[in-house]
Image (cartoon, helix red, strand yellow):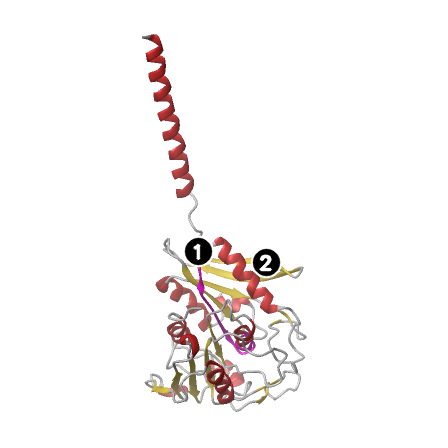
Amino acid sequence: MIQTIKKIFKILALFILVGYLASCRKTDIEVTPIQVGLFTENITVNGIIRRYAIYIPKGLGNSSYPLIFELHGGGVYIEDMTGESGFKTPYKLWMSKADSEKFIVIFPEGLNGTYGKPTWNDCRANAMVSSTANDVNFISKLIDKISASYNININRIYASGTSNGGIMALRLAVELSDRIAAVAATVSAMADSSECGQPINPISVLFMNGTDDNNLPYNGGTIGNPPNPNHGTVFSTETSVNIWTTFNQTDTIPNVYNFPDLDPNDGGTVLRYIYSNGNEGTEVVLYKVLGGGHSAPSILEQYSLLFEQSFGRQNHDIEMTTEVWIFFKDKTL
């Protein structure tokens, strides 16, 4: 009888222990939620500490989600991109878009160029103002780090950029097409004197350029206002588009759409050309911003008249981040 009672107590103790351990495991899972919001972090690449900002929206859920890189223009800091510096910035709208569409945004920062502010080492072989950093490796290492920490859909990683950042995004299209599903380049074009090789994999590419850009000429040539040989040279927008439609073997006749002129006072309108049916489902898109200057179009984040005196008119008929997300969201590796 005593032995039977001892066995019963041992069994009860075993059940209690198992229940306790199970509750501990459940608690461990529940107390490690994803930290949400905007954070500035560092990563060491090639022995150099690099900065980036990351935005994590609420409610990502358990399924995998896209990752978007937004690359600044030359001389721009990540605080200027996120709005933390207090300036108008269309790029901060990526964060509200991430909230509604559920993806992670990264704002990486280039290293200082010859004028002491952040730049990207894009494909311009004849540019003397940018850093010599291996920025392709920087972006690749960031993909590794973020993918190790979050449930990233590795088939839905995208890069968008403006000016120097847009030309850098085009470099990623050439050299990182095994990891990047699509790129968008605003007020940017392909380098006509390139240190990069030829593209390898089909990849969807978007251009969004102003016809009155006084810094990166729509018809190609020397970059700068006034033109400065140290800034290098680019192909025209039309030639840049043709490079990618030819490589991707898209349709040669585009679908054309004229956006409503929401702001008649901004000095221009927007035409969209979509070249579809490329290899592996790729497409090439051109947003031709008639009368637009050297800036990303925006309805909500409008630059000052002082800005426009230096960089030309900003279009207010479309929202750059909205249009780029529409382009990105159905693209996969």
Name the residue tied to disc 2.
Answer: 43
Magenta-colored stretch includes residue 302: no
Q: Earlier in the sequence, mark 1 or mark 2?
A: 2
Residue 317, by quadrant, is bottom left
> Which residues lie in the magenta part?
153-168
Q: Amino acid at mark 1?
A: Asn
Instruction: Say left or right for 49 vs 147.
Output: right
Residue 313, image x, y percentages: 46, 85
Q: Main secondary structure of the magenta part?
A: strand
Q: Amino acid at mark 2?
A: Ile
Q: 214 or 143, which is in the foreground?
A: 143
Residue 64, by quadrant, is bottom left
Image quarter in which the C terminus is found? bottom left
Magenta-colored stretch includes residue 157: yes
Residue 6, image x, y percentages: 36, 13
Name the residue tied to disc 1.
Answer: 151
Residue 12, image x, y percentages: 34, 21
Q: Residues within 10 Å of mark 1 (few under 14, many from 20)?
A: some
Q: 314 or 45, which is in the foreground?
A: 45
Of the residues tagged 1 and 2, which is closer to the observer?
Answer: 1
254 relative to 118, above or below: below
Mark 1 and mark 2: Cα distance apart in space = 19 Å
Residue at the spot 63% in from the left edge and 82% down from the top edge: 231
Q: Is residue 250 visible?
A: yes
Residue 263, image x, y percentages: 35, 84
Q: 220 or 192, which is in the foreground?
A: 192
Residue at the spot 50% in from the left edge and 54% down from the top edge: 148
**Which label number is shown at residue 258?**
none
